[in-house]
Amino acid sequence: MSVVAGTLGTTSRFGDRKATAPDPTDPKAQQDAAIDVDDVSTTEFINTLAEDVKILWKDSIAINSTAFEGEEDGKQTFIGSKTETALLSFGRDHLGMGPVSVERSNAQLIQMIPFDSGRKCMGVVVQLQNGTYRLLVKGASEIMLGHCTKIIRDPTKAVTEASMSGDNNKSLNQIIDTYATRSLRTIGLLYRDFEQWPPAGARTQPDDPQQAEFSDVLKDMTFLGV
């Protein structure tokens, strides 16, 4: 498995047209293919992104993951689920990701939220250099979209947010559906910044008052990409 296509926001897209070609025998797939979700090559796409957007994307892959580096049949590789290892390979090949162990040790990890089959997602909280906190979440795209009230404004300029409009929501659902018709598994990436952790008003876990209840913070998220 590998990452062959993706979208940040609603209009910044990349993809391997050959790898994501729709089934020629499926009329719906052909209709959905009219939505051009594969604008440029991965390399061209990455070169258009703002540096802080690339860092946010890299962290969403490297830090919010349970996969790790190891050895199989005498070769260095990533070990974990196919989805997780595909994302890590993408981060290494295209986002300047260093060794996973180094990326994680350099991050100020505050809280880890394991994958939950009910919520269909996992998350991690890191403290940024400016002292604020960032919640990174990834999971099933169509479900993740429901937790968002904002969307990244322009990935080519900076990590800034805009309100999620009805048109944004419709476009993202259409993009997710189009990827699905091409037999692609989609993963949604979200984030949200906080001034303090645990956030004001959020319940804390009974056994650790420094850990927030995930259900209280998994809202008003910003949609980064799919």
Image (cartoon, rainbow, N blue to C red):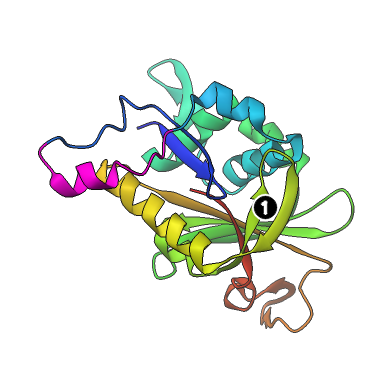
Q: Which three-letter amino acid code belongs to the residue tagged 1?
A: Arg
The residue drawn where x is 31% and y is 42% is 34
Q: Magenta part of the protein: which range?
A: 25-38
In the image, residue 11 lies at what x, y percent?
A: 53, 44
In the image, residue 157 lies at what x, y percent?
A: 74, 40
Kindly state the secondary structure of the residue where label 1 is placed: strand
* Any part of residue 74 in sight: yes
Q: Exactly how many numbered labels are in the figure?
A: 1
Residue on which the image places disc 1: 153
| Residue that extends furthest to the top in the rendered view of this protein | 74
Give the quadrant of the N terminus: top left
| Residue that extends furthest to the right in the rendered view of this protein | 130
In the image, residue 194 lies at what x, y percent?
A: 78, 66
Residue 130 vertical position relative to residue 199 in the rendered view, above or below? above
Question: Magenta span has 6?
Answer: no
Residue 15, by quadrant, is: top left
Q: Nearer the viewer, residue 21 or 127?
A: 21
Using residue 87 as the reference point, say whether residue 54 is left or right of it.
Answer: right
Residue 100 vertical position relative to residue 74 in the rendered view, above or below? below
The residue drawn where x is 62% and y is 65% is 221
Assess disc 1: are there few (<14), some (14-19) or many (≥20) residues with their C-alpha within 10 Å of its C-alpha: many
Using residue 91 as the reference point, say whether residue 5 is left or right of it.
Answer: left
Using residue 80 as the reference point, say whether residue 30 is left or right of it.
Answer: left
Question: Magenta span has 33?
Answer: yes
The residue drawn where x is 17% and y is 37% is 23
* Any part of residue 95 in sight: no
Residue 84 vertical position relative to residue 164 in the rendered view, above or below? above
